[in-house]
Amino acid sequence: MLKGRLAVVTGSTSGIGLGIARGLARQGADILLNGFGDAELTRSLCTQISEEFHVRVLHHGADMSSAEQIRNMITYAVNEFGRLDILVNNAGIQHTATVDQFPEERWDAVIAVNLSSNFHTIKAALPHMKARSWGRIINVASVHGLVGSMNKSAYVAAKHGVVGLTKVVALETAQTGISCNAICPGWVLTPLVQRQIDDLAARENITNEQAQARLLGEKQPSGDFATPEQIAELAVFLCSDSAAQIRGAAFAIDGGWTAQ
Ligand code: NAD
């Protein structure tokens, strides 16, 4: 379905981003991976995906907190692949503390990586999509783009911002072949969430399994994690022709979290 397309997926050396990159590659898209990790890891991810799905895969290590590095990454993508069709804004970080204890530099970092990066990538990518009158922009927001939770002021502010940015980009591109939508996952078991489980287990002196159950029990009625593969399948659908008139939507995949 996506043969001949190029997808840039930010934060795709791990977790949800890696799942989405693999899902798009399975449909035939060439992939520019991005994200942290040593040279050996990124080389082996490129080789694995490329060999498994017979697509071209490169990695660019741009730091999503730097507008200049983001612009360099988009230029690199277009120079290497000759096009840019799909942009998945997925890179994200977390920091938890009450507002009055929240370190200012952590606030700035979370807003930069989780929100401002989406503006910079979209601004740089749009001219290349417009040139071909086709594009798909998918922003990985969060349930925290729709509802709040204590101790996550910067993350919740950033993700609500992503949902708002998604709507504006969708309106500005509404009469083109470019669409922009957001995916809002609930708990997905990735390294980002495992760190929160480890913290909870250490704080409460409970096992990993007990901490997982506690985390899910507080918010996610299904009692199960969503998976990167499930999120990737929605991303693939949003890239299809059937999804051409889905514009500015924010899709929860959250085991019922935001239904409460
Ligand atoms: P993860 O920690 O497994 O992966 C994050 C990826 O982003 C990694 O590839 C990392 O290298 C990259 N990254 C981090 N900072 C970066 C930077 N400054 N520049 C470039 N790359 C950077 O996390 P994940 O759980 O897969 O999260 C991916 C996205 O999904 C995030 O935006 C997160 O907010 C969102 N999300 C996750 C969950 C969840 O439960 N895991 C729920 C809702 C939303």
Image: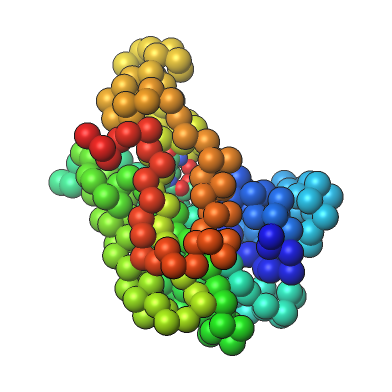
Q: For residue 76, which quarter of the picture?
A: bottom right
As drawn, is 174 to the left or to the right of 127? left
As drawn, is 92 to the left or to the right of 155? right
Total marks in image: 0
As drawn, is 199 to the left or to the right of 89? left
Q: Position of residue 247 (x, y in %)?
A: 40, 67
Residue in the foreground of this view, choosing between 188 and 85: 85
Q: Residue at x 56, y 82 (%)?
A: 133
Residue 204 to residue 144: above or below: above
Residue 135 to residue 224: above or below: below
Q: Split into 4 quadrants, where in the image is the C terminus?
A: top left
Q: Position of residue 61 (x, y in %)?
A: 63, 62
Q: Position of residue 100 (x, y in %)?
A: 15, 46
Q: Residue at x 45, y 30 (%)?
A: 225
Q: Looking at the image, which residue sits at the far left? A: 100
Residue in the foreground of this view, choosing between 96 and 187: 187
Q: For residue 224, which quarter of the picture?
A: top left
Q: In the rendered image, is residue 147 in sight? A: yes
Q: Residue at x 47, y 81 (%)?
A: 176
Residue in the foreground of this view, choosing between 234 and 22: 234
Q: For residue 201, which quarter of the picture?
A: top left
Residue 95 to residue 110: above or below: above
Q: Residue at x 68, y 62 (%)?
A: 2
Residue in the foreground of this view, choosing between 260 and 109: 260
